[in-house]
Amino acid sequence: MRAMVFEGVGQPLRMVERPIPEPQPGQLLLRVLACGICRTDLHLLDGEVSVPDPPRVLGHQIVGEVQPGGRRVGVPWLGWTDGVCRYCRAGQENLCEHARFTGRDIDGGFAEYTVADERFCFPISDDYHDLQAAPLLCAGLIGYRSMRMCGDAERLGFYGFGAAAHILTQVAIWQEREVLAFTRPGDATTQAFALELGATWAGPSDAAPPEPLDAAIIFAPDGALVPAALRAVRPGGTVVCGGIHMSDIPSFPYDILWGERTVRSVANLTRADAEEFLELAPRVPVHTHVTQYPLEDVNRALADLRAGRFTGAAVVTP
């Protein structure tokens, strides 16, 4: 089979030929139908999030066909937990002390075949084509967990309007919330895209919103957005950092945190998140906006993500 392999920080992924993997007890062999591109893949490439044992096949938003059998399943970032540590026992498997992650500790979906722990494979609704389903498996799931941390906030600000925010905007509007989109300064294309999806306002991330936010979610990996978001939320509001990596947060005056504002992070996901969101998405219904790349063009897809050359999500198809 063909696979795009990570061999070291700063190096492009390399196409190699590998044997089709053999599933172990409790695993499924999957023919990869589609795999979403994620900003976490850039953090892995850049060494901001470590890859413990390269070479490794990246890719953690997998839509696959079980071999044999043919049923479709989705595989997310969280790929294995021990089930016995204090976090797993407390219902916080997203914080498992020995967790293994798809496309980091376990070979992922930038390949023609992969294997996955059956416990962390989820059925995909027939309402979704392979391409449209793939971004739900990380952009959707992590975004949904982030939005849950906002409670019943009615006016939401999304800082960084990419794969996750374009999905979450649709869910938020369906829940009768208001969405304001914050993009890179000068990015009129993405601002227009956010307004098309139903955001009531879209502007640069260094601008103040027209009204104070009840909560903000920061998807862009820029620590300078934390004080900006704190200034934008009302007293009692919440700022959620939704990424796995962020640049250093600059110092900020206490008065923008005072007033019982909260800053918190979101880490990974749980199987309950996946089950809940994948049941909800077709009811909204969420429509993912996708740019498609063939497997051999993964490096171009990653470069396009870094440069912000597409709106919505990117998906690789073997």
Image: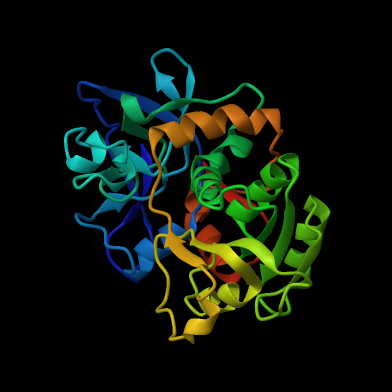
Residue at horizontal 59 percent and vertical 72 percent from the top: 229
Q: Is residue 297 above or below residue 137?
A: below
Where is residue 120 shown, x and y percent of the image? 36, 30
Using the image as rendered, state which of residue 79 and residue 219 is in the foreground.
219
Using the image as rendered, state which of residue 55 and residue 118 is in the foreground.
118
Q: Is residue 136 above or below residue 226?
A: above
Quadrant assignment, res 234? bottom right
Does residue 235 appear to the left or right of 105 in the view shown?
Answer: right
- Number of labels in the image equals 0
In which quadrant of the rendered image does the N terminus lie?
top left
Does residue 251 appear to the left or right of 79 in the view shown?
Answer: right
Does residue 191 appear to the left or right of 165 in the view shown?
Answer: right
Where is residue 89 shown, x and y percent of the image? 23, 34
Q: Is residue 234 above or below residue 279?
A: below
Residue at horizontal 40 percent and vertical 60 percent from the top: 244
Quadrant assignment, res 132? top right
Quadrant assignment, res 11? bottom left
Residue at horizontal 46 percent and vertical 36 percent from the top: 273
Where is residue 136 shown, x and y percent of the image? 56, 40
Where is residue 246 shown, x and y percent of the image? 42, 70
Can residue 63 be seen in the rendering of this structure? no
**Residue placed farthest to the top in the image?**
69
Does residue 41 appear to the left or right of 96 in the view shown?
Answer: right
Q: Is residue 194 above or below residue 105?
A: below
Residue at horizontal 51 percent and vertical 68 percent from the top: 260
Can residue 307 be seen in the rendering of this structure? yes
